[in-house]
Amino acid sequence: MNKRQITAGILIIGNEVLSGRTKDVNLQYLTLKLGEIGIQVSEARVVLDEEDKIISAVNHLRSVYDYLFTTGGIGPTHDDITSLSIAKAFGIGHEKHPEAEAILRSYYKIGDITEARLRMAELPVGAHLLYNPVSHAPGFCVENVYVLPGVPKIMQAIFEGFYNNLTGGVPILSYSISTLLGEGIIGTDLGVLQLKHPEVSIGSYPFLKDGKTGTSLVARHTDQVLLEQVKNELQSLIVKLGGDVLSDLNNSET
Amino acid sequence: MNKRQITAGILIIGNEVLSGRTKDVNLQYLTLKLGEIGIQVSEARVVLDEEDKIISAVNHLRSVYDYLFTTGGIGPTHDDITSLSIAKAFGIGHEKHPEAEAILRSYYKIGDITEARLRMAELPVGAHLLYNPVSHAPGFCVENVYVLPGVPKIMQAIFEGFYNNLTGGVPILSYSISTLLGEGIIGTDLGVLQLKHPEVSIGSYPFLKDGKTGTSLVARHTDQVLLEQVKNELQSLIVKLGGDVLSDLNNSET
């Protein structure tokens, strides 16, 4: 097992996310799935469908993190400029990929093979295909950059097909509890507990739910034994301050 | 009315978003509200609760865009490091803000004024307060950087309080339609139409919904007359290719 922390960046490409028309749901999916295999998403960016913005973000994120996953902009229309931008980011050519073209030609009836659809077979030279069981037009990867579509169902289907082959790290375990005590009540003691265990990431998240307010605490580390110890200390802290230890209310949006 | 395009960056700060525990809903809210007053969100980033990451993203985004809005990391616990990071990004001091402290002291009962809660009154020197009608601990702004909490209801309440004072641009109007024709069928003609109107942003978004597949087209520009012309041309394009013009299926997640 690889003991080093494995990291990833995520790049979400699309005017529709920055205009608010589309609510991105790919970030959370990818962060959860990657976390399961010990890949920590360390940064995400959302950029417009503009070549210079895409190239600059790709080149930064692929050099800083072990992996980069992009979503969006690989369809057949004029605003799908991700593939060409990836080629430019790597300084490599962009041409019809024979296997991708064969996949598209075997999927579509002859009359349906449009010029626009064949654009989806134009990929950076040397790209590896990531197969698409839903709508067939493949994603692809170049070195450590995995290029996926934006439509969640299709993105997920492609991702599921290759993600067992990613090199993960030690899975990060987490322990969560909630209390109706406010952050302002537990904050000072919690800070002391964090200082005692600097290697454990302890997060504190206020919630407002069904008229109740309180705090969820999340401890994350790769070591089960250490996490168990922090769990006991978190529970003692809450009890000491007069609170009840509740299961995590999993208030995922607040 | 300011005719220049006004732009904004958004910085979402928090381990919980990059671990997948929390699904961010603030990006879409801010992009939609800012779009209404002609402020185009041009980039968003999500970073961990790490000082160097926050400082670097803040200094980039505040210098490239007219506005920067941050969410997350301004509560009372040890993992709330946004405020101090903003001060460091600007190279200014960080100390107790008398008015913020007065607000907190008048809101909490004397026994409830904890050291942790008073941390929320420590702000970059010279920061302007952004009032919080829900939980009182204020957001703040320094120059063009608006610093907001991560809890959506509180973030929105603060935002509503100051957003009429932002300097907007010309509101961007949009026109959307859907068709059951696939992107691969309309892609080539659509590309020609985009070339004819390079100043109009025309986006094409495939959808899969209720067993139907098709394409939504979105044209965006500030000029109503031009947009009306593009609308007519988009409708003609769909009809020419044998499709029906449908109202936008508004399939916001696909």
Image (spheres, coloured by chain):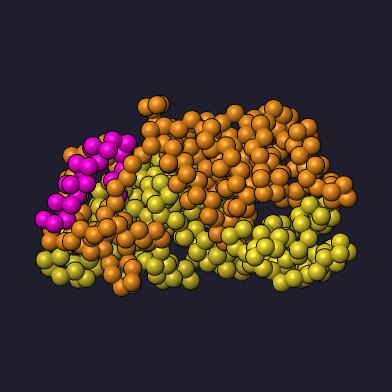
Chain colours: A orange, B yellow
Q: Position of residue A53 (x, y in %)?
A: 61, 43
User: Who is closer to the viewer here, A101 or A119?
Assistant: A101
Residue at 14%, 51% in the rendered image: A236
Q: Position of residue B8 (x, y in %)?
A: 53, 55
- Near-viewer residue (B231 or A130): A130
Q: Residue at x 76, y 63 (%)?
A: B180
Magenta range: A218-240
Count of numbered circles on the image: 0
Left of B35 or right of it: where is B19? Answer: left
Q: The N terminus of chain A is located in which quarter? A: top left
- Magenta-colored segment: predominant secondary structure: helix
Side of A244 where B56 appears, left or right:
right
Quadrant of the drawing holding the C terminus of chain A? bottom left
Q: Is residue B61 visible?
A: no
Question: Residue B18: percent from the left, percent from the top?
Answer: 43, 47
Q: Is residue A242 magenta?
A: no
Give whichever of A40, B160 is nearer the camera.
Answer: A40
Whether residue A47 sits left or right of residue B133 in the image: it is: right
Residue at image position (31%, 39%) is A221
Determine which quarter of the picture holds residue B70: bottom left
On screen, B203 above or below B133?
above
Percent position (x, y) of residue A163? 53, 38
* Residue found 39% across the figure and 52% down from its top: B21
In the image, residue A225 above or below residue B230: above
Q: Is residue B184 visible?
A: yes
